[in-house]
Each structure stands twice: as C-alpha cells, then as structure tokens.
Image (tube, rainbow, N blue to C red):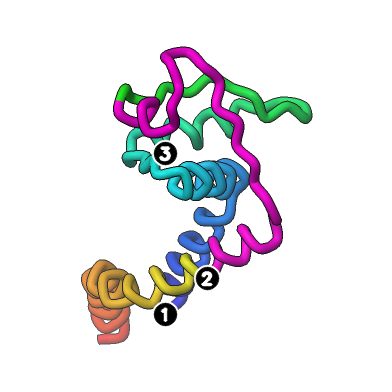
Amino acid sequence: MDTLQQIFEKEIMGQFTFPVVGAKLIKRQLEKKGVFLNKNQVGKLEKKFQAISGDTLSFDFDLDDAQNKILGNSDGEKVEIDIGDPDQELDEIYQEFVANLKDSIPEIVNEMALPILSDLRKKRSCNA
C-alpha cells in the first residue's frame, strides 16, 4: 500500500508546482476570453514558468492564428492576462483537481494493480 500512497502523493505534488499552477492560471484566463490552449501549448507555458527568474512574468508565447483572431490580436501583439483574485483562482484549480482525481482513482488503481500484485508475489515467495 505504500506504493499507492507514494504515487498518490507524487500526483498531488506534481499538480501544485509553480509551473503547473502558473500555466493553469493563464490557461483559465484565456479560456474566459474564448481561447483554448492545446496540451502542447500548456506544456510550453509550464516550461516558460520553469525558466522564470526574478519577479517578472512576461514572456513570449505563440498562439495560433485562430487564437489570435479570437483575442482580436494581430500577430506579435502582446496579450495581457489579469489573474483577478488569485485566492479564488487557486481554489477553483484545487476544486478542479479534486474532481478530476475522483474520476482518476479507478485508472490509478488499475495502473497500480500489477506492481502491487508483483510485490505480494515476491513477499509470498520469500515467506514460503
């Protein structure tokens, strides 16, 4: 059971790192404007957050033509993102995580079934 607990804790910790939360905050604000980022774009955002040094949160990011059109931007024009109430935004991200986690538990258990079974078999053969 330690293995399942470790995977669970790793998943939780991974979802609340600065780069992941930062990318989610920007993704949510863009979605409010009608722009939906794909997984690749979210991954690039996370990498941008990993590379941030200092207090500046300004970086270049490529939106596709359709996304720029929705925002009413010409190519190369800067997009300003207002996070609004950070506490509320973070709470919503947390609530979303909890909802997704509930849906993911069967998948997590299925992924863990073979390693747990293997561990039980090793323990059984050592005790035999």
Image quarter of residue 53: top right
104 is higher (above) or lower (below) than 85: below
Which x, y percent locates residue 50? 58, 32
77 magenta-colored: yes
Residue 20 left/right relative to 89: left
The foreground one among 99 and 15 is 99
- Which badge, 2 or 1, is on the more N-terminal residue? 1
Quadrant location of the N terminus? bottom left
Residue labelled with disc 1: 1
Which x, y percent locates residue 122? 27, 74
Which amino acid type is shown beneath numbered disc 1?
Met
Residue farthest top in this picture: 76
Q: How many residues crowd around disc 3 within 10 Å: few (fewer than 14), some, or many (20 or more)?
A: some
Q: Which one is in front in this view, the residue at disc 2 or the one at disc 1?
A: 2
Residue labelled with disc 2: 95
Residue labelled with disc 3: 42
- Which badge, 2 or 3, is on the more N-terminal residue? 3
Residue located at (56% from left, 20% from top): 78
Which amino acid type is shown beneath numbered disc 3?
Val
- Magenta span: 66-94
Task: Classify mark 2: helix, strand or loop.
Answer: helix
- Which badge, 1 or 3, is on the more N-terminal residue? 1
Residue located at (43% from left, 47% from top): 31
The foreground one among 122 and 64 is 64
Label 1–label 3 contact, CB within 8 A: no
Q: How many residues crowd around disc 2 within 10 Å: few (fewer than 14), some, or many (20 or more)?
A: few
Which x, y percent locates residue 126? 30, 78
Label 2–label 1 contact, CB within 8 A: no
Q: Report the label total.
A: 3
Which amino acid type is shown beneath numbered disc 2?
Gln
